[in-house]
Amino acid sequence: MDPYIFLIQLLNGVQYGLLLFLVASGLTLIFGIMGVINLAHGSFYMLGAYLAWSLTAQLGNFWLALLAGFVLSVVLGILLEWLFIRHLYRRDHLQQVLLTYGLILIFSELRSIVWGDDVHSVAVPTLLAGSIPLTETLAYPVYRVWLSIVCVVLAAGMYYLIQHTRLGMMVRAGASNREMTQSLGIDIGLLYRLVFAFGVALAAFAGMLAAPVSSVFPGMGNQVLIICFVVVVIGGIGSVKGAMAAALLIGLVDTFGKVVEFEISGFRVLPELAGMSVFVMMAIVLLWRPEGLFARRLR
Amino acid sequence: MAAADCLELEDMSDDVLIEARGIHAYYGASHVLHGVDLHLRRGETIGLMGRNGMGKTTLLRSMLGLLPPASGSVQVRGRGMTGAAPHRIARAGVAYVPEGRGIFPNLSVRENLLMAARAGHDGRDDWTLDRALDTFPRLRERLAHGGQQLSGGEQQMLTIARALLTNPDVLILDEATEGLAPLVAQEIWRILQRIRESGISSIIVDKNFSAVSTIADRNVILVKGQIVFQGGSEALRARPQLLQAWLGV
Ligand SMILES: Nc1ncnc2c1ncn2[C@@H]1O[C@H](COP(=O)(O)OP(=O)(O)O)[C@@H](O)[C@H]1O
Ligand SMILES: [Mg+2]
């Protein structure tokens, strides 16, 4: 493979992986800390993308849209936790799956009513519209580089928050022993609400960031949800570190899977098969390590 | 009624830090506590004793909001706290060292301590990390270790130190010396004595009758979810056959 094409694919794979991490980290945190399987998590990604599209159109500025969308998604997260999710903490997984599946349908319907079913695109903000030339014919978009950097900064911030702040200690304590955490004077209900809202905001933010590089379309939430469950399972349920490793792995496997298969296909390989590489990898990882790359422990 | 009596009554109620009245508690259909009254005054240390399964832990958990009682009331410094969330009771100045210790194995020793540290309900903050580590020098050497790497005695010290860092008025200890080597248990008793001298009131549940009755101002004995004895240690030691029946000692 041409080294520059390889480099571009590598960057694309990393960028896709980092974006997946933003969504999957919330999913794994919500499961690891509160024990809730949240099928609606992909919907937040979809909502984020639609918010970016509609707010950019309304406010005339991508950056303002990003800010407003972030605030709105935090508020949405707090409301949802209060209305629905907090009733799920002591319930079994079936009830969690049923309720959060219901939320998917509601969000999908709301999206259809408010924004319609069309595919949209969001323009890359002018500040980041340029490209970095690699060869005479190949260039890499500045926006994608910026996107990756933002994801890395967010991931580092999350790591710091969880590992090195008192809030993070409380969250980890709550994941290991809810009662004891409460008996030390910590309002675990409030803590859970924050964690949930944070997860929602991350997923929505990922959707907003992704909007200028991919199209904004109705099924995007479910697509990302499935891949994110793969990330969570491969990484080890509840492990943020694992989510990072698995997201990058999947980003790369998916990106290169498409290219390599194209290259080695002496005979015709259906393009859909490329998408299977991710699931093949999940099967391999789970055969080797049934509990995922990083066992469940919030460290 | 004389004015002096009134005053004294008021003083007494002001002085009660935590009080349970007429507590009935159930696990499903099994009726575990049958109308228990217990109160702890400022500066007091209570020894709560009884054989296994008599309801000691259940009583503590009812008072701590972890198992809201089916009937009866809980008050902390005169304020109604029946059915209040455990964190509210903790924030009112009640710290808990549970049976089985309850350390966070996925946090380091330092993190176990720091996540709990705060000023008391009245703003007091005499218990700092440094003071706690002076009281438990062994923990100082283990600060960076994970909670699960500690010995049983060290885990117990960590739980007590963590409780103290919330600057409580009331310390509730459930079987703090259970399963510890005699020398380590002695060290814990010495520390409990020092905590008592620092002015913190305690309810201590323990199997070691002689150690409890030495430190306690008042002993309370539970049999099948009811209080059968309440009084000083001398009165109790004077009735060996009842002790045998109630506690098996
Ligand atoms: N979680 C529980 N579910 C059902 N029964 C329980 C539970 N915890 C304790 N019990 C029962 O309640 C009674 C009192 O238990 P407990 O308060 O733990 O006693 P103690 O602390 O005095 O040993 C016992 O008969 C015990 O079997
Ligand atoms: Mg007990």
Image (cartoon, coloured by chain):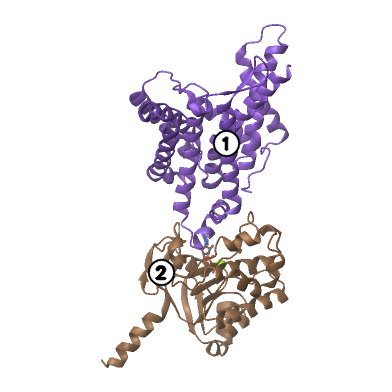
Crowding around mark 2 (Cα neighbors within 10 Å: few <14, some 14 to 19, many 20+) is many
Secondary structure under badge 1? helix
Give how far across and how far down residue B56 sits, in percent: 52, 70
* Colour chain B appears in: brown
Residues marked 2 and 1 touching at CB (< 8 Å) = no
B156 shown above or below A244: below
Mark carried by residue A262: none
Residue B130 appears at what percent x and percent y?
62, 71
Q: Is residue A17 above or below residue B190?
A: above
Q: Is mark 2 on a helix, strand or loop?
A: strand
Residue A168 at x, y = what percent? Answer: 56, 52
Q: Label 1 is found on which chain of the structure? A: A
- Find chain A in the image and tell me its colour: purple
Which residue is under mark 2?
Answer: B23
**Subunit of label 2:** B
Residues A75 and A209: in front is A209
Q: Which amino acid does label 2 sit on?
A: Ile
**Marks 2 and 1, Cα distance to the nearest angstrom?**
54 Å
Q: Name the residue under label 1.
A: A151
Q: Quadrant of residue B9?
A: bottom left
Return the residue nearer the eye: B114 or A285: B114
